[in-house]
Image (cartoon, helix red, strand yellow):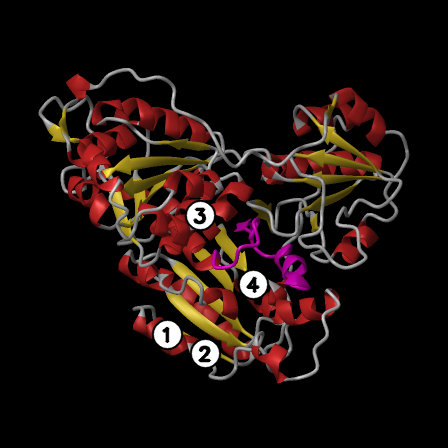
Amino acid sequence: MPARVPPGCTGPVPRARSGSPGAGSLVPARPGRTVRPVTGADLLVEALLEHGVRVCFGNPGTSEMHFVAALDRYPGMRGVLCLSEGVATGAADGYGRMAGHPAATLLHLGPGLANGLANLHNARRAGTPMLTVVGDHAASHRGLDSPLESDIDALAGTVSAFVHRPAEPAALPRDVAAAVEAAAAGAVATLIVPADVSWADVSWADAVAQPSAAVRGAPAPPRPPAAPPHHVEKVLTSGEPAALLLDGAALTAGGLRAADRIAQVTGARLFCPTWPARLRRGAGVPAVTPLGYRGEDVREQLGDVRHLVLAGARRPVASFAYPGRDGDLVPPGVRVHTLTGSLGELADRIAPGVAARPAERVRHAVPAGPLTARNWAYVIADRLPPEAVVCDESITSGLATLPVAMSGAAAHDVLGLVGLAIGQGLPLAAGAALACPDRPVVCLEADGSAMYTLPALWTHARERLDVTTVVLNNRSYAILRAELDRVGARRSGTGSARMVDLDDPALDFVHLSHGMGVPATRATTTQDLAAQFAAAVAEPGPHLIEAVLTT
């Protein structure tokens, strides 16, 4: 896993948003424990509150109704209804990345968990703290093989570092504590709560100490052996060409300042993953170059490097296999070293007294004309409000220009598509907005991936979230069109084209957005996008702009 990002929504608050509900408006958990008889679900909710879990994104069913009823008795827990499980899990991911501590999700049995797995996968790859509560049938019902019966434990194990099934309601306080502890380490923790555990009468006084909960499933990817700090220092000051690959805490403002100080003294180049979990970017922050998405681009970026130092990052590999190509993207002859210890301490040893070089605010004069994949990002960058949270799922439309354009925008945090499971952007924005109600959230969303979790717009409207969504409509799965050629697949007719094109019928995001309760406009020119985006971010609440790209 990448190194954890320090918690919290940092930076100055640009403006107040009256009437925008969020984490700051929650009623705190009651001091002391309830002694009156309650259900297991009451005990579960109260235990979550005692351990700092204040928000639950849910798409519940029959087995979770006692949890739902408990929300009436515990106003400190904010229940956020999501119209699909992928929205719930993606929103909890966005919340955890920005808050630095877990939200909960409430899912219905195995199929509900299965529907949310894609964004749980993204959360696992991002190292997001998240607690997933999955309801199950009562013990007496499981042997009947009813229609929704499934192996929930196996499903949860594919994405969770911690999976546990409470045996009795009195064990819930200890089990919740163990799950929150596991999640806080930067992982998905899953509690599978049978219906009879939820509805049983119990009290805090009956709570008993239980053995430590089982830990299983979804191990972290293997990492190379770490090098001692002084070895890395020797490598970086050797005079041989070197690069730092930064991730996790190294992509905070402090980490980037330390890396830039090292780069000034050693000449090392600074890189980050193509789509990091969280990156501080913009004016006042030292710039870092994302690795390319395509393997050949990464090999070119690292071609003149002799030492690659991983600072909170994984060794770069290709996202997919291609015929005749090596998936390891480290060029031959490049030695890879993994930094241990503090990047700041390393900078103090290598570059004492050297000041970091912050990026400058850059204004772009974008020519008037049709919107294209080459100009839209500069329009957004020029009008991005200070301290925005940018949820980036622009994919193909943003690969070439977005990092360059946004490096000169107002300072902001960007949340990327770490796990490459599309359908993340809209839910991620909902969670980020709830974690940081006093910061504007901007969702940059591709048209095809938007359709995976479009009901997140309803949650934006229902919760009155300050999210401005820009849907980049190029009427295709453009990245798949390119991948057809890259994998060497032959295409010569309409059959393959129909599997990647989205223009028959054309998607109308303005009408779709209105139907979810979110005001929407359509932009076809740079002038349209500039005016509509400026108006949207100036007015609190959710908005959507369909940006129609010609090329």
Nearer to us in this view, 154 or 453? 154
Q: Which residue is mark 4?
A: 394
- Mark 4–mark 1 Cα distance, whole angstroms, equals 19 Å
> Dot 1 corresponds to which residue?
512
Residue assigned mark 2: 507
Label 4 is placed on what type of residue? Ser
Could you say which is closer to the camera, residue 400 or residue 295?
A: 295
Q: Residue 460: which disc? A: none
Quarter that holds the N terminus: top right
Which residue is denoted by mark 3 in the rendering? 94
Indicate which disc, 2 or 4, sits on the residue closer to the N terminus: 4
Q: Nearer the viewer, mark 2 or mark 4?
A: 2
**Who's the residue at 90% across and 33% down the image?**
239
Label 4 near label 2: C-beta < 8 Å? no
Q: Earlier in the sequence, mark 4 or mark 3?
A: 3
Helix or strand or loop: what does disc 3 sit on? helix
As for residue 498 lying within the magenta part, the answer is no
